[in-house]
Image (tube, grey):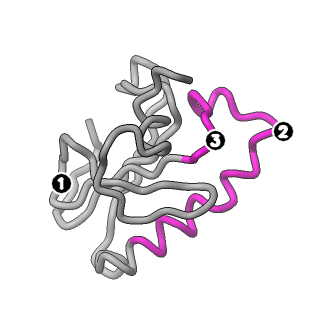
Amino acid sequence: MNECIFCKIINKEIKSEIVYEDEKFVVFKDINPKAPIHLLLVPKQHISSINDIDEKNENFLEGVFNVIKNVAKRLDFFETGYRIVLNTGKDSGQEVLHIHFHILAKRKFSWPPG
């Protein structure tokens, strides 16, 4: 995992604008935002994608949505709404092989996405 950019952010080897951190997760601002608020929620445990979740690491999912909800409340987009995106694999647009959730807010989103 030495080359993983998200692992380097988690380990503070690369500077990032972190908005939330606990023992399991880091949430930081995306460097190429697609909305006024564009955050990335990354588990500290390196898991390449949702395809690599198994019984040994499935418990990290328990906290994902609570962290998102708490960040949405703290950054004042809980009531107005937000979009959560999880890309898996190259055809979906996953560029970093460390599972991460995009949290986008503070603009209207259309459907279907992409």
Give the residue at mark 3. 45
x and y percentages locating residue 52 in the rendered image: 67, 28
Which residue is depicted at the point 28% across and 55% down? 17
- Tell me if mark 3 has few (under 14), some (14-19) or many (20+) residues whose alpha carbon lies within 10 angstroms of its own: some
- Tell me if mark 1 has few (under 14), some (14-19) or many (20+) residues whose alpha carbon lies within 10 angstroms of its own: some
The magenta segment is 43-71
Mark 2: which secondary structure? loop
Image quadrant of residue 56?
top right
Residue nearest the viewer, comparing 89 with 20: 20
Residue nearest the viewer, comparing 15 with 38: 15
Q: How far apart are the alpha carbons under marks 1 and 3?
A: 27 Å
Q: Nearer the viewer, mark 3 or mark 2?
A: 3
Give the residue at mark 1. 35
Mark 3: which secondary structure? loop
Q: How far apart are the alpha carbons under marks 1 and 2?
A: 34 Å
Query: Which amino acid lies under the numbered mark 2 shown in the image of this protein?
Result: Glu
Disc number for residue 55: 2
Disc on the earlier residue, 1 or 3: 1
Which residue is depicted at the point 70% across and 34% down? 53
Relative to 27, residue 91 above or below: above
Disc on the earlier residue, 3 or 2: 3
Q: How far apart are the alpha carbons under marks 3 and 2?
A: 14 Å
* Residue at the extreme front: 13
Q: Is residue 50 magenta?
A: yes
Query: Which amino acid lies under the numbered mark 1 shown in the image of this protein?
Result: Ala
